Image (cartoon, rainbow, N blue to C red):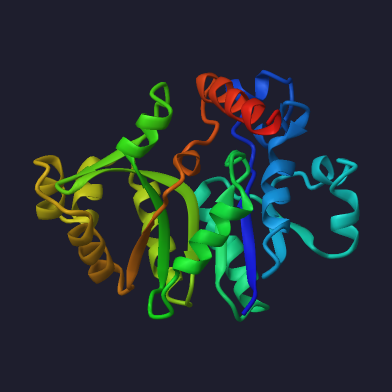
Amino acid sequence: MTYSVLILAGNRGPACSVAALDGVSHKALLSINGVTMIERVISALREVTIIEKVTIAIETPEVLKSIPNLKPLFTNGYLETITAMPTPAQSVLNGFEALSAGQNGPILMTTADNCLLTSEIVQHFINSLNQDTDVTAAVAKTDLVLEAYPQARRTRMSFSDGSQGGCNLFAFQTGKARNIINFWRLIEQNRKSPLTMLRQLGFWVVLRYLSNSLSIAQALNKLGQRTGTKLAITQMPFPEAAIDVDTIDDYKLVESILSKRENK
């Protein structure tokens, strides 16, 4: 079985403080220790031999094709681009439809700022996938991340059985993954209407989450029932898997981690 990968690398707009550090048009083009974030992600993916193609969602493909190390990968077909849409969920749906048309195996999805990604992280995630699941998400326990990096400030989800952080790494394993992507789009569209969002998520589920009485298994089950999908998570043993570059503080932390990793 082979895999395709979708990388979200769309423009975050002129207000993106991270891109402004380097004066670049896209956060994906920001260099950390001399290597752009998008190159770091692609380098990790290339070491996983069962990944045969990587598609990057971006508005201006030229900015990627001008990177010397990436030019041959576009030429040989390993890399291709697709137009980034106005929102992440729309970009994911657009990429999913394009990749599903010519790909029989699962589709992995990650982001260009997930630049601590390694082949070990990706392979561990792939090895964890169950064939009877429609969508799998990689997560890491908040305690694991903070124990290794106390300064990390990550968005966390608090469940009755522990706090979790997302890893920006997903597997769309069947065509039913489209259901969960469309649900995500619906939540995006109604983000300014809390009442509508509550209806979509379910009042009882939201109340249980807010009262810290909802386990992660219960949350997956409820969301799966609502979308007609079988959902799963993979607990990642790598704290770095949950750290990406959303802020300048994130950039400083990632720069420090990479400096130590690369100077060993």
Residue 85 against residue 227 in the figure, above or below: above
Question: Which percent across, then down, holds residue 51?
Answer: 68, 66
**The quarter of the displayed image where residue 242 is located:** top left
Question: Which percent across, then down, holds residue 13?
Answer: 61, 30
For the residue pair 122 and 202, the one nearer the viewer reads as 122
Q: Residue at x 23, y 49 (%)?
A: 196
Question: Which percent across, then down, holds residue 236?
Answer: 42, 51
Locate residue 96 relative to residue 194 in the image: left or right.
right
For the residue pair 8 and 165, the one nearer the viewer reads as 165
Residue 119 against residue 179 in the figure, above or below: above
Residue 91 visible in the current orientation: no
Q: Residue at x 44, y 40 (%)?
A: 239
Locate residue 159 relative to residue 152 in the image: left or right.
left
**The quarter of the displayed image where residue 82 is located:** bottom right
Q: Quadrant of the N terminus?
A: bottom right
Locate residue 145 relative to residue 103 in the image: left or right.
left
Residue 159 against residue 174 in the figure, above or below: above
